[in-house]
Amino acid sequence: MTRSFRILAVAVLAVVLALSSAQNAFAVTELAYDDGVSVSGVLPIYGGVRFSLPTGVTSAKLLYIRFDWSITATNELNIYVTGPDHVTLLTPAILNVATGTGVGCPGTWVHSCSGYDVSGLGITVTGDFYVIVQPQAQGTGNPMADAANSGRSFDGANLAGLTNVLTGDWLIRVDIDPITSVAAGAPVGGFMEPVNKLVVFAPYLALFGVIGAVAVFFWKRPDN
């Protein structure tokens, strides 16, 4: 293998890594509608939030579900992810969940930051979808709510009956990985976490630097 070929191979690898880093910088988006301040715990039979994909995203992979939960000894619940009719399951019901400590919760969630990683379940969401929690029984924990009202939180006696608008917002948030790109500056359902611009553009700067270095190398070769 000639020296020039080895250098070219290294340059190509660097370009691939830079592009991969740039893609990952845009990958995860959090959708949320609550104000982040837990006020009260309610024991619904079923309680859920209607999420909407950001403008410009037609489908996305559901990665993570986080929620504020009143602290109990068991902390057990069932989770349902449905389509826009809050009945059609997008994945088999996630039953008998004992949640453990969640990640990515705001510091104002003062009860129990709980979470569930669903990235391995292959859940693809399009348009509107619901994430619904169901305490297994009295004393197994309650979902927490804020004092605001986005009109996106509901409760009911069953999935089909999830039509009662909550006076607050369930503290339930999700992470998604958009399958299509979000248009620059487009409004989103809930909010997107801000992205450090230096982190976003650094892979591109590295890419341009590699291309320039390779170009200079081949330009200065004795056989040119």
Image (spheres, helix red, strand yellow):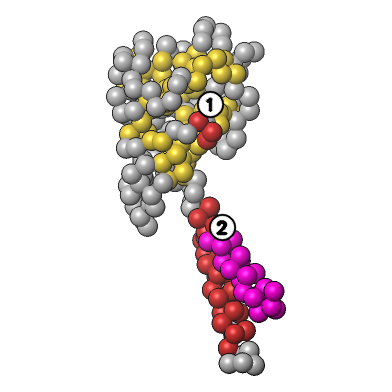
Q: Which residue is mark 1?
A: 68
Label 2 to label 1: alpha-carbon separation = 32 Å
- Which span of residues is magenta-colored? 1-19
Q: Nearer the viewer, residue 165 or 29?
A: 29
The image shows residue 105 at horizontal and vertical percentages of 56, 35
Quarter of the image for residue 198 reads bottom right
The image shows residue 203 at horizontal and vertical percentages of 56, 64
Any magenta on residue 14? Answer: yes
Q: Residue at x 38, y 23 (%)?
A: 89
- Of the two numbered discs 2 and 1 on the same chain, state the one appearing first in sequence: 2
The residue type indicated by label 2 comes to: Ser
Q: Which mark is residue 21?
A: 2
Q: Nearer the viewer, residue 47 or 63?
A: 63
In this orientation, does residue 155 appear?
yes
**Badge nearest the viewer, 2 or 1:** 2
The image shows residue 208 at horizontal and vertical percentages of 54, 73
Q: Residue at x 34, y 37 (%)?
A: 126
In this orientation, does residue 149 appear?
no
The image shows residue 191 at horizontal and vertical percentages of 42, 43
Element at label 2: helix
Q: Residue at x 64, y 93 (%)?
A: 222
Residue 98 relative to residue 182: left or right: right
Image quadrant occupied by the N terminus: bottom right
Image quadrant occupied by the C terminus: bottom right
